[in-house]
């Protein structure tokens, strides 16, 4: 640079800037070396980090040497300066090598990147040859200014052309902003050189431009972090690097502002120069510290929003929780894990159960619940069929690590950062909770199934016992009828005996069936009534009507016979003259209605019952003249055992005389009929 500089402020600002740059570049090299073991990480990342460290370290050493009084044209000073610009010349070589696999998709792009990369290598070789032979031989006492400018200009042109070829990949903010930061660093350095030559007689301006030209290269380092990081915690490093850079820039601005000529003039004209200088510097420092605090407070939000494009992780966790609440199997949870990976634009995320992989040696830290980063290829990647596997996140279920989230970000994506890893941890916790809930649900279903089987067995035993009460009761009444006919009409008694045998064959054949089709029960009643008609003769009229819609519906075995028997014995038996019996089965909404009516002598009291049957009159059918009450009591208990609240029996008096018993049962088809 040909312009005059204020040496003191320049050296102080350079020391601060190069010190910050050296720290940042050293950490960059350390993390990049560690990340080079991850799949898809280009080796050129390490070359770039080395160039960054060499530029800042050599610049820091050169500034210290000048500060300690080393002449500018001394060999050591010139060697340090040559090291700086050699590193600067190598930057385009590294950056173009990194960009090439990310951007070159078409044949034209591949050719363009190869040509630029070759040109950058030639540029680096020429600049190195021009810098070092004279310094090493001692024939050159100072690096020519033109050589420095050529290094800056050539680097700017090469990277600008590379950015032009790379533009179709700069659609996403995550790729675009870091690339712009890199190009800004290169262009800023070149522009500062040009402006310092245009205004050579303004020492303060030339000082500031020279500092900018040397320190703006930190933007290249920071931008490269954004674009090429392939390691965890890069976001923390980036945020802290920006804070270090901001603090360094604040100190540099303070030094440059404090050296402005008009402040020196104010100091000279003041009555107390030292006090005035202290006051000015205090006010200036306070203003810059306030500005730094304000900027630092917004750094993290800006980095998340504009650099990493971080989504609303709380909202994503809520969405995952909502999705998990609707899943009912482990495979569906794996689908939600895929959704979590898509939200972070990961190449693949798999939920893997540990139980089938007992032969694999899992890291102890992973089994203790810690996230494990796979730094090198191994059997896990091969066995899990994830070549780009980088991270394993444990999923706790049943008090232990039962599953893993296998994370493969993909080589085209930057490395996972802290917030993303924390999000995956939170998602894994949600998956573990849902696995626990599914396990509890399965246990409850199994328990309910066992309880249902036991309840069914108890119900069947109860129904068998209740039906066993009907069989001897029915047999006793039928035999009494036959005994009476043997004296009065032996032939009819023989017919009744045959019919009774047919009836009992039906009873025995269906003794193990809880339910039978309605039409079979009706046929059984017809046979039974033929026995009773022999006893009643012409005094009994029977009318049976069955809706074909319900003919195949199933009803409890022998549910109608006790009602018919009670109607005959206690309603129509005591009635003098003609009696009628009506039996009907029809649809009532979603239920089936069974009716048994008689126009006999009537009943004592009528009650409507649902569930348990209470208040049964002594006659058993609500009619005068009964003795044991087995019939309706038995039916009510069977309905309660089979249908609980869905079965209903109604006992009521008919307006024209007699009794009506109605049974309402749920239909198996559940189809309402109007």
Image (spheres, helix red, strand yellow):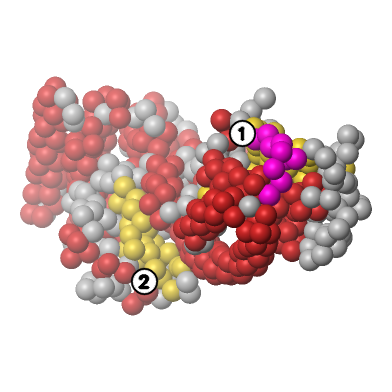
Instruction: Report x, y in % for residue 576.
Output: 85, 44
Instruction: Report x, y in % for residue 142.
Output: 21, 47
- Residue 246 in sight in this render: no
The quadrant in which residue 184 appears is top left
Say few, some or many: other residues with alpha carbon within 10 Å of mark 2 (under 14 / 14 to 19 / 20 or more): some
Does 537 appear in magenta? yes
Does dot 2 land on a helix, a strand or a loop? helix
Q: Residue 573 versus residue 465: which sits nearer the camera? A: 573
Q: Residue 261 versus residue 484: which sits nearer the camera? A: 484
Does dot 1 land on a helix, a strand or a loop? strand
* Label placed on residue 366: 2
Magenta-highlighted residues: 535-544
Where does label 1 land, which residue? Answer: 546
- Residue 578 in sight in this render: yes
Quadrant containing the N terminus in the rendered view: top left
Residue at 31%, 47% (x, y): give it: 348
Q: Is 610 on the left-hand or right-hand side of 312? A: right
Quadrant containing the C terminus in the rendered view: top right
Residue at 64%, 32% (x, y): give it: 545
Classify 613 as above or below 124.
Answer: below
Instruction: Report x, y in % for residue 482.
Output: 63, 58
Residue at 63%, 67% (x, y): give it: 472
How far is disc 2 from disc 1 in space, using C-alphas?
Answer: 71 Å
Instruction: Report x, y in % for residue 316.
Output: 53, 45
């Amino acid at each position: 640079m040909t312009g005059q500089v204020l040496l003191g402020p320049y050296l102080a600002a350079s020391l601060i800037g190069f010190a910050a740059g050296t720290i940042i570049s050293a950490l960059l090299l350390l993390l990049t070396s560690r990340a080079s073991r991850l799949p898809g990480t280009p080796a050129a990342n390490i070359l770039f980090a080395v160039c960054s460290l060499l530029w800042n370290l050599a610049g820091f050493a050169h500034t210290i040497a000048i500060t300690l009084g080393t002449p500018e044209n001394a060999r050591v000073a010139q060697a340090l300066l040559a090291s700086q610009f050699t590193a600067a010349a190598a930057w385009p070589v590294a950056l173009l090598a990194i960009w090439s696999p990310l951007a070159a998709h078409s044949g034209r792009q591949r050719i363009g990147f190869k040509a630029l990369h070759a040109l950058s290598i030639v540029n680096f070789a020429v600049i190195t040859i021009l810098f070092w032979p004279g310094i090493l031989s001692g024939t050159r006492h100072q690096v020519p200014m033109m050589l420095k400018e050529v290094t800056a200009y050539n680097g700017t042109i090469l990277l600008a052309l590379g950015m032009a070829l790379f533009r179709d990949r700069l659609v996403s903010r995550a790729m675009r902003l870091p690339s712009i930061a890199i190009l800004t660093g290169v262009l800023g350095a070149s522009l500062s050189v040009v402006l310092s030559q245009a205004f050579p007689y303004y020492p303060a301006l030339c000082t500031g431009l020279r500092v900018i030209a040397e320190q703006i290269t930190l933007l290249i380092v920071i931008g490269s972090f954004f674009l090429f990081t392939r390691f965890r915690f890069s976001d923390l490093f980036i945020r802290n690097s920006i804070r270090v850079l901001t603090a360094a820039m604040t100190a540099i601005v303070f030094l440059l502002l404090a050296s402005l000529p008009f402040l020196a003039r104010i100091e000279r004209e003041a009555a107390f120069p030292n006090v005035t200088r202290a006051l000015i510097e205090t006010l200036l420092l306070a203003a810059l510290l306030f500005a730094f605090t304000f900027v630092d407070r917004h750094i993290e939000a800006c980095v998340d929003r504009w650099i990493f494009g971080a989504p609303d992780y709380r909202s994503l966790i809520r969405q995952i929780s909502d999705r998990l609440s609707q899943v009912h199997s482990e495979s569906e949870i794996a689908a939600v894990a895929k959704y979590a990976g898509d939200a972070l634009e990961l190449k693949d995320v798999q939920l893997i159960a540990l139980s089938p992989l007992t032969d694999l040696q899992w890291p102890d830290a992973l089994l203790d619940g810690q996230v494990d980063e796979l730094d090198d290829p191994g059997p896990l990647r091969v066995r899990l069929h994830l070549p780009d596997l980088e991270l394993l996140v444990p999923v706790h279920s049943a008090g232990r690590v039962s599953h893993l989230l296998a994370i493969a970000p993909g080589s085209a994506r930057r490395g996972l950062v802290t917030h993303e890893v924390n999000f995956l941890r939170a998602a894994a916790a949600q998956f573990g909770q849902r696995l626990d809930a599914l396990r509890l649900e399965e246990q409850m279903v199994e328990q309910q199934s066992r309880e249902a089987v036991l309840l069914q067995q108890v119900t069947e035993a109860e129904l068998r016992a209740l039906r066993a009460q009907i069989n001897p009761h029915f047999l006793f009444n039928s035999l009494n009828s036959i005994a009476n006919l043997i004296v009065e009409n032996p032939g009819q008694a023989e017919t009744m005996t045959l019919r009774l045998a047919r009836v009992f064959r039906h009873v025995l054949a269906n003794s193990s069936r809880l339910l039978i089709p309605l039409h079979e029960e009706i046929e059984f009643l017809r046979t039974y009534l033929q026995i009773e008609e022999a006893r009643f003769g012409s005094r009994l009229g029977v009318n049976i009507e069955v809706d074909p819609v319900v003919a195949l519906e199933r009803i409890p075995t022998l549910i109608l016979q006790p009602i018919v028997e009670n109607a005959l014995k206690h309603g129509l038996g005591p009635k003098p003259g003609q009696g009628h019996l009506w039996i009907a089965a029809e649809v009532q909404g979603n239920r089936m209605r069974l009716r048994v009516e008689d126009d006999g002598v009537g009943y004592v009291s009528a009650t409507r019952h649902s569930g348990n049957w209470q208040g049964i009159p002594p006659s058993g059918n609500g009619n005068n003249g009964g003795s044991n009450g087995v019939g309706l009591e038995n039916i009510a208990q069977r309905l309660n055992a089979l249908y609980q609240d869905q079965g209903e029996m109604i006992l009521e008096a008919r307006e024209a005389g007699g009794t009506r018993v109605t049974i309402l049962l749920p239909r198996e088809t559940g189809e309402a009929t109007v």
